[in-house]
Amino acid sequence: MNIRAIGIFMLSAAFLTTAECRDRIRPEPVSRSSGPVGNGVNANGTVSMNGSKNMYFQAKKQQDVGIFNFETKTVLLNSGYAMPITGLGTYSLSDEVSAKSVSEHLKAGGRLIDTAFFYRNERGVGQGIRQSGIPREEVFITTKLYPSQYANAETAIEEALERLDSGYIDMMLLHHPGAHDVQAYRAMEKAVKEGKIRSIGLSCFYISELDRFLPQITIMPALVQNEIHPYYQDNDVTPYIQSKGIVVQGWYPLGGRGHTAELLGDPVIRDIARTHGKSSAQIILRWNLQKSVAVIPGSSNPDHIRENLDIFDFTLSDEEMARINALDRNEKHDWY
């Protein structure tokens, strides 16, 4: 999720069933001190591993990049690391509330936490991870640099590491375009080479921004976070990003900015929810996953945190997916 809380091959917008995802990678944790490894992305959209176990999740050789694995609940990034496809957004949560929510999320089986400098809760996120009792190497931490930090990004990266107190950062993003954004991204590239960050990416970047930005950098972004929900489906931008071998993650998956109640109460969503014995939120999150869009819904409610993770025991039909697809209003709920 962004301030709010956002080439290889085109990923299908059609849903993936559990059967289609069988026999893919199983995650294997790595040592806390290990840094990134040099895995090569092949022309056919697969990643060749160099034999090192120094990966957040070790994947089988030739595993397809960007394919959602509904069994392991991960997706292999073009950086060679696997990322959970569901997570917890922490926008607007204080340090204290973040620590509690993160701990609840991890104890419930979640493994991805999304934070940012702008959220002012990186210390709380780090504390929650330690309080959970879950080993650091099993947790995927995403944080972001804000435009006010871009001119001094190397210092900002060190400060994020200090606040999180996590040894390394799994994913760092630029929060959105701004002055000195290329300079800041190059600082993140340097931190990848130094083993401080494992994967890097962007948030709130759309086609024109990416066309300007990508020719100026060396490491292809592993992830782009954008606002995506049934009322704003980003149907032009998402396939464009995915066609470059970049995973897409949606912030505001449940509407956000005062629109959550309207979206959760949508008659189409509610009807499908009744069919599956699920909540509206679970239907929306599952819809995202079946469109190969990872999700980071935010919550401080333990029941909602657990509910948001319980979306792997059912599948939306083609007809149900089409009904939700038809809800698109091109209605953006934030300014970027």
Image: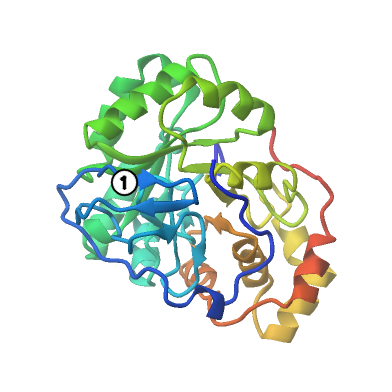
Q: How far from the left and from the top, in percent, is residue 173?
A: 45, 36
Q: Quadrant of residue 284?
A: bottom right
Disc 1 residue type? Asn
Give residue 280's quadrant in the image.
Answer: bottom right
Q: How is the image coloured?
A: rainbow
Looking at the figure, which quarter contains the C terminus? top right
The residue located at (51%, 75%) in the rendering is 310
Spot occupied by residue 236 in the image (x, y as percentages of width and height): 74, 43
Look at the image and tell me whether residue 71 can be seen. Answer: yes
Residue 121 lies, in percent from the top left, at 38, 42
Which residue is painted at 39% across and 52% down in the image? Answer: 47
Q: Nearer the viewer, residue 29 or 64?
A: 64
Residue 279 left/right relative to 80? right
- Say whether residue 17 is left or right of residue 153: right
Q: Which residue in the structure is indicated by mark 1? A: 39
The correct choice, above or below, for 96 with respect to 205 in the image is: below
Q: Nearer the viewer, residue 38 or 74?
A: 38
Q: Decide: is 40 above or below 130.
A: above
The percent position of residue 241, horizontal first and vertical second, equals 61, 42
Q: Residues within 10 Å of mark 1 (few under 14, many from 20)?
A: some
